[in-house]
Image (tube, grey):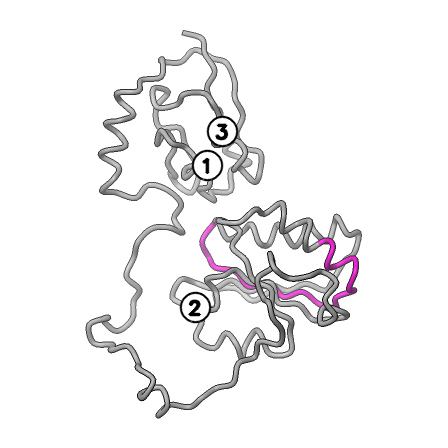
Amino acid sequence: MIRKIISIDQEKCNGCGLCIDACHEGALELIDGKAVLISDEYCDGLGDCLPECPTGAIEIIEREAAPFDEELVKERMQSRSAAHTGCPGSRAQVLNQAPLSTRAPQNSTQAEKTEQRPSKLGQWPCQLKLVNPQASYLKNANLLIAADCTAFAHASFHERFMDGRITLIGCPKLDDNNYYIQKLAEIIKLNNPQSIKVVRMEVPCCNGIVRAVKEAMLLAETVVPYSETVLSVQGEILQDI
């Protein structure tokens, strides 16, 4: 039968996995770093995944396709409950560190015996959603724009990245990236930042924070000296550019 169904441009797909999380029928999977429609029968053609795609790789077309099968979808969703096939950044994994069973959490008494390192956070709030673009601390500042998870992944985050910078954090996967673009553009326009340092995780969905900063500079018609660091989920520095 001829019906509406999604089509994915593999050249445009960046492998972020946002469309997979948005598809309630489980019709999409990441294969070799690209989103793929597993079966026509799983796709209802309504396109819930379209708004989530940051690169415009998905469209709805009309073509010969097997009809949508709701019973097959139910079976698939039940079988998927035991396996993860979505965004690689959400995949459960144990990190290559000392076994958790041998690493007792520190209580306050133990912490007092270790060196107390001062925080390098220079302002409050630090959540990008909450920051006032007209706040005085933003004027001519060196900005650190970091994905939420980075400070938990890298042990020396304060000393290496935050010292001497105004820190703004957010999650490009869970938050509205278009809002970030508008907010950052306003901050750039009003405050003449001296530099922008982006720190993100290696997972594909974290690319959104880079896109937000670069599009904000275009929107603000201002080029700010830019650098970027990519961290592994182990906290290692993979790229420092």
> Which of the labelled discs sits on residue 133, or is there none?
none
Residue in view at x 24 percent, y 78 percent: 104
Where's residue 232, x and y in %? 43, 63
Q: Residue at x 40, y 28 (%)?
A: 37
Q: Is residue 6 left or right of residue 124?
A: left
Q: Nearer the viewer, residue 224 or 50?
A: 50
The residue located at (40%, 7%) in the rendering is: 1
The alpha-carbon separation of the residues under discs 3 and 1 comes to: 10 Å
Read off the magenta span.
185-204
How far apart marks 3 and 2 lie (CA) works out to 34 Å
Secondary structure found at label 3: strand
**Residue 152: assigned label:** 2
Which amino acid is tagged 2? Phe
Question: SS for tag 2?
Answer: helix
Label annotation for residue 8: 3
Residue named by callout 1:
19
Quarter of image, res 3: top left
Query: Could you tell me if the residues under marks 3 and 1 are in contact, i.e. CB atoms within 8 Å?
Result: yes
How busy is the neighbourhood of tag 1: few (under 14 within 10 Å), some, or many (20 plus)?
A: many
Above or below — where is 194 with respect to 181? Answer: below
Task: Name above or below for residue 153 compared with residue 44.
Answer: below
Camera-near label (3 vs 1) is 1
**Camera-nearest label, 3 or 2:** 2
* Upstream in sequence: badge 3 or badge 1: 3
